[in-house]
Amino acid sequence: MRLTELKTKQPAIINQIYHLNRSQDGGEDGIATRLMSLGFVPGEKIEVLTRGLFGGEPILVKVGFSRFALRRNEADRIEVNV
């Protein structure tokens, strides 16, 4: 299941981060790399704390002891297991 499908206050474990190669030169996916450098790594606990009022964005998540506000396109790259 994707992080965007996770219910509020439902704990989960990160399974993987999806990398997209959009650049023609085959460069790295900056968003996926940044998420992983911030601690969004397989095996880490994650929880959706709240969602924005209009369209559900941003999504406030807790990873470890840190909190992050993610856009939907960022959260959709994170696969979790409940």
Image (cartoon, rainbow, N blue to C red):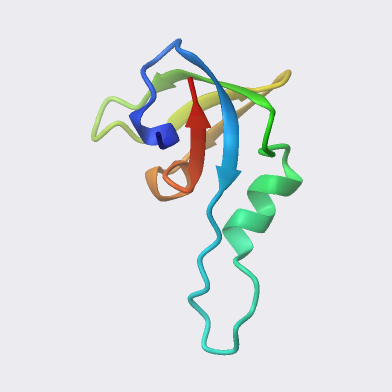
The residue positioned farthest toward the left in the image shown: 55
**Which residue: 45% across, 12% down?**
10
Reply above or below: 43 against 35.
above
| 44 is higher (above) or lower (below) than 18 | above
- Looking at the picture, tell me which residue is in the foreground, 67 or 44: 44
Question: Percent from the top left, x then y, of residue 53?
Answer: 27, 25
Q: Is residue 65 visible?
A: yes
* Residue extending furthest toward the bottom: 25
Q: Quadrant of residue 9?
A: top left
Q: Is residue 66 above or below residue 25?
A: above
Q: Quadrant of residue 72?
A: top left
Percent of width and height locating residue 69 = 52, 33
> Does residue 34 appear to the left or right of 81 in the view shown?
right
Tell me: 72 left or right of 23: left
Eyeballing the image, is 19 above or below 26?
A: above
Q: Residue at x 42, y 18 (%)?
A: 50
- Total of numbered circles in the picture? 0
Quarter occupied by the N terminus:
top left
Residue 16 spot, x, y in % from top left: 58, 43
* Image point (69%, 30%), residue name: 43
Task: Answer with left or right where residue 21 lies relative to residue 63.
Answer: left
Which residue is farthest top?
9
Q: Position of residue 14 (x, y in %)?
A: 59, 32
Q: In this orientation, does residue 58 appear?
A: no
